[in-house]
Amino acid sequence: MGFRKTLLLALGLAATALTTNAAAQAYPGKPVKIIVPFAAGGPADNYARFIAQRLQDSLGQSFVVDNRPGAGSIIGTDMVAKAAPDGYTLLMMSNTHTVNETLIPAKPFQLMRDFVAVAPVNYSDLVLVANPALPASTLKDLVQQAKARPGKLNYASSGPGTPYHMAGELFKSMADVYLVHIPYRGSSGARTDVIGGQVDVMFDAVTTMAEQIKAGKVKAIATTGRTRSDVLPDVPTMNEAGVPGYEATIWLGLMAPRGTPKAVVDRLNEAVSKIASQPEVKQLWVKQGAVPLLMTPEVFDKYMRDDIAKWSRVIKTAGIKVD
């Protein structure tokens, strides 16, 4: 390549970099939509709205949350996969998505092929709860009843592949019991029916179920973290209560369509990380049972790939299938 061509190429690359950086500095120049592929009222919806408001305050543009639930998060996620890769349509995702890569392979998208990692948000433990009428107040009681009456007890979830579904299947596998899975379109409906006595038990996020427990609307059986929840310190972990080695959480993050400019992704990552690092935000989330996650896009990408591999092993070993 001659000197002139080399110079022109270098100038072209420099111009492209300047244009990209200028575009990133100008971003966002119009309202940004955050698609939540889950029903309103659950952790993904609640934290999407929290992050949207804080991003609006820090970046000076509207961030609008749009709930598009259905098919275990696939409907809303596919909308984002097909959106323009310009940073104006984002996905609020959870470990439902990493689970579904193995559990539901016949999807119109692939997570790590069709999206780019933007930023994680937070994670929280789950809690196993029972409706007040169920004659079981401990995990030992529940396991005994399930073994005595296989298939007679049931558990609700917010849909196939969700953390609540996988927590239930992991429990069934590790405790060697059989409970019938009752999938809902969202966690709010599942929660309502457990409280109302239509369903026996469910795993739910501590962040959304703690108040129901404290109000006596459901019985807390056990939490799913490695250590007891600061929000529910009197409730034993699954490990303490009789299922050694059990652990399950729900975590949330933002992704964008593949092809979104890296400068825009980096700008969003920086903004979300600043929000999650604020002392008042940390304190608020800890009171709710959530812990901030801080990662660069590259580290978050690896985190998701590792999670896909982890759940692939669990699903295949336990023979878990969509009902």
Image (cartoon, rainbow, N blue to C red):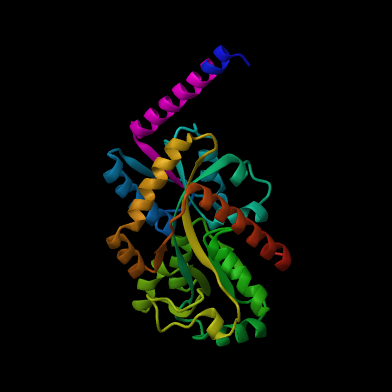
Which residue does the image show at 67% across and 65% down from the upper left? Answer: 314
Percent coordinates x, y for residue 110 in the rendering: 62, 44
Answer yes or no: is residue 112 visible. Answer: yes
Query: Which one is nearer the viewer's eye here, 41 or 192?
Result: 41
Q: Position of residue 56 (x, y in %)?
A: 30, 43
Above/below status of 236 relative to 64: below
Extreme-front residue of the structure = 3
Q: Is 228 drawn above or below residue 20 in the view shown?
A: below
| Quadrant in the picture for the C terminus | bottom right
> Viewed as shown, does residue 175 lie left or right of 193?
right
Residue drawn at the location 51% of the way across and 71% of the way down: 202
Q: Image quadrant for the N terminus?
A: top right
Residue drawn at x 57%, y 47% is: 74
Residue at 43% in and 72% down = 195
Q: Is residue 178 visible to us here?
A: no
Which of the 4 image quarters holds residue 25? top left
User: Residue 216 magenta-drawn?
Assistant: no
Magenta region, main secondary structure: helix
Residue 59 in picture, x, y percent from top left: 30, 41
Q: Is residue 27 magenta?
A: yes
Residue 237: horizontal and vertical position, in percent?
50, 80
Residue closest to the eye, 78 or 273: 273
- State left or right for residue 197 relative to residue 106: left
79, 308: nearer the viewer? 308
Relative to residue 316, is residue 82 depicted above or below?
above
Range shown magenta: 8-36
Query: In which quadrant of the rendered view does residue 90 lie?
Result: top left
How many marks are shown on the rendered structure?
0
